[in-house]
């Protein structure tokens, strides 16, 4: 692996964590939104990551038992959380349906805060990796100057 690949790998991680953070922020922003039916209620969303494989290595290893090498991460998609919504009996609420129920999203604020902290730290770790790689490259260039 070359030092230049490190920038690509860390950059893909930063991009993926940025999308994860945006998804988490969207979940938190809609945590208390109410609706009169389950179909109209916001559902929590989560980013799904998958490894990006080296295109050259995929051809080489296609017919062998050797491991393929990952060269980063990509967002495979955004999925809706399958946990049930939160129906609450609030007959005085203007959003209540005929039976007096209001539906709230299946967003768990504690889980979302944990995701936010995790994605923020992961983003920062990728920044640190890029900084370390840059420092190593600069030191390599100064070796011949002495």
Image (cartoon, grey):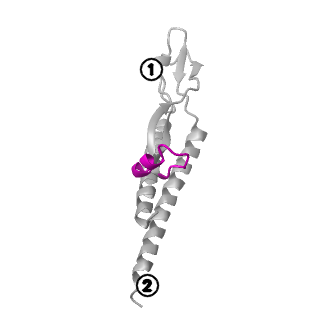
Which image quarter is the C terminus in? Answer: bottom left
Residue 25, percent across and down?
47, 42
Identity of the residue drawn at 53% across and 47% down: 116
Q: Is residue 139 magenta?
A: no
Identity of the residue drawn at 48% across and 32% down: 79
Instruction: State the residue lying farthest toward the front.
Output: 63
In this view, the residue in front, 33 or 120, is 120
Q: Which mark is residue 143?
A: 2
N-term-proximal mark, 2 vs 1: 1
Instruction: State the residue lying farthest toward the top.
Output: 98
Mark 1 element type: helix
Q: Which mark is residue 106?
A: none
Q: Is residue 77 visible?
A: yes
- Give the Cα separation between the discs numbered 2 and 1: 63 Å
Identity of the residue drawn at 42% across and 61% down: 5
In this view, the residue in front, 111 or 81, is 81
**Apparent side of residue 24 relative to residue 145 in the rendered image (left or right):** right
In this view, the residue in front, 54 or 120, is 54
145 w.r.t. 17: above or below: below
Identity of the residue drawn at 56% across and 50% down: 118
Mark 2 element type: helix
Residue 93, percent across and down?
51, 19
Depth-wise, is mark 2 or mark 1 nearer the camera? 2
- Residue beneath label 1, please? 40
73 w.r.t. 136: above or below: above
- Which stretch appears magenta? 53-70
Do the numbered discs 2 and 1 sit on residues whose CB atoms are within 8 Å? no
Badge 2: few (under 14), some or many (20 or more) residues near its Cα, within 10 Å? few
């Amino acid at each position: 692996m070359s030092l230049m690949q490190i920038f690509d790998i860390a950059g893909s991680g930063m991009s993926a964590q940025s999308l994860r953070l945006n998804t988490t922020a969207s979940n938190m922003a809609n945590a208390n939104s109410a609706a009169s039916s389950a179909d109209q209620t916001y559902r929590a969303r989560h980013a799904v990551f998958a490894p990006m494989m080296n295109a050259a290595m995929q051809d080489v290893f296609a017919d062998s038992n050797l491991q393929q090498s990952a060269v980063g991460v990509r967002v495979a998609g955004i999925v809706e959380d399958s946990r049930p919504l939160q129906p609450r009996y609030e007959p005085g609420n203007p959003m209540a349906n005929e039976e007096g129920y209001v539906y709230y999203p299946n967003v768990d604020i504690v889980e979302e805060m944990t995701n936010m902290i995790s994605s923020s730290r992961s983003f920062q770790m990728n920044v640190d990796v890029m900084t370390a790689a840059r420092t190593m490259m600069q030191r390599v260039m100064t070796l011949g100057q002495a």
